[in-house]
Image (tube, rainbow, N blue to C red):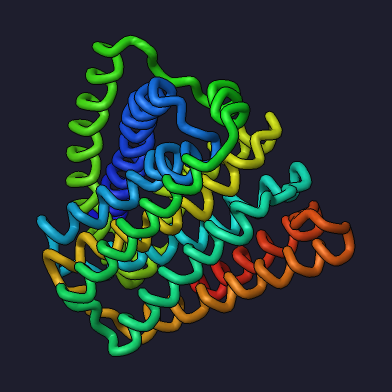
Amino acid sequence: MLNSLLIINLLLTLGSLFFLIFASNLVLNGAIGIAKRFKLSPLVIGSTIVAFGGILPTIAVSIAIVFFDPFNIDIAIGNMVGTNYVNLGLALGIPAFLTDIITKYNVFEKEIPLYLAITALVTAFAANADISQPEGFLILIAYAMIALIIFQYSSRERKSDVKKAEMDIPNPGQTNTAKIILSILSGMIILILAAFSLTYSAPILATSLGVSPYIIGLTLVGIGTSLPTIVASIQAAKKGYIDIILGNVFGGNIINLGIGIGLPAVFHSLKLDNEAIADIYFTNIYNFIILIIILIEMKLLGGNKALSRVSGIVIVGIYLLYLLTKIL
């Protein structure tokens, strides 16, 4: 009986993750269609539209848990923390292994510092094991300011970069207005239903496996909801769209921290256990390691900031080692 229940909930969880990814792609295609009409730059499309589409499953699950199953808030917290680790470890590490990532100054000197700043803000709020509703509101305000700054960066780019945006998007999206609206609406409906399904199956799965809901959120749910970001980064690496990779990863993590943590905290204060606090602290160490790797390779390779194949192996290796310690 227990094995049957385990199998049913495992299939339900995996099915929910599949439809979350499918729905996020529908929303993403529609959003890219809108972005193309406004001729946004590749960095902004990667930092906002593509990144938001990739992080949408994570946010949907976290919000659904807060509204429908607040007693299992640990799954939402694990999901959000796990997603940031996956984005850095796999969505950045794997593309770096496939191709050298030469970062631009507007990424290294602007977007990465903004990501580090909002990470520090969330870490400070998490220190007392509780991200309160006022703190969630402040996180949302911080994200809104960061999003505005990123758009201001875009407005200063050359017209040639804006024209290049039409070519530098891995998925061109829809161009017909009716199809754009249908894609976004249908995607949102499926996304809500799949997120609701996951809030039901994931806690039962955790109980069946004898592990904490936080670990399920950190591993299975966190990795599953991050698959769109990983796939988008790998596709961009194969086609040489470096701006999309960097904007996708760091922009996605900014959105995850700003909306994925800030928005649920506004409706329900997030209680953190010691394990979650330790993982949030280690995120800052992981960020520091990646930053040091970029600075070292910049010194060795010259003026451009770079992540080479060796860097990719190191970044992925650290993530896998961290994941192994959690599983064990």
Percent x, y of residue 234:
62, 39
Q: Quadrant of residue 287?
A: bottom right
The answer to which of 260 and 85 lies nearer the viewer is: 260
Percent x, y of residue 223:
46, 53
Q: Residue at x 20, y 44 (%)?
A: 197
Q: Residue at x 59, y 22 (%)?
A: 167
Residue 263, placed above or below residue 229:
below
User: In this rendering, would 43 be left or right of 80?
Assistant: right
Q: Residue at x 30, y 56 (%)?
A: 144
Percent x, y of residue 26:
34, 26
The answer to which of 194 and 240 lies nearer the viewer is: 240
Picture quarter with the N terminus: bottom left
Percent x, y of residue 161:
60, 31
Q: Quadrant of residue 75?
A: bottom left
User: In this rendering, would 147 be left or right of 325?
Assistant: left
Residue 46, placed above or below residue 141:
above
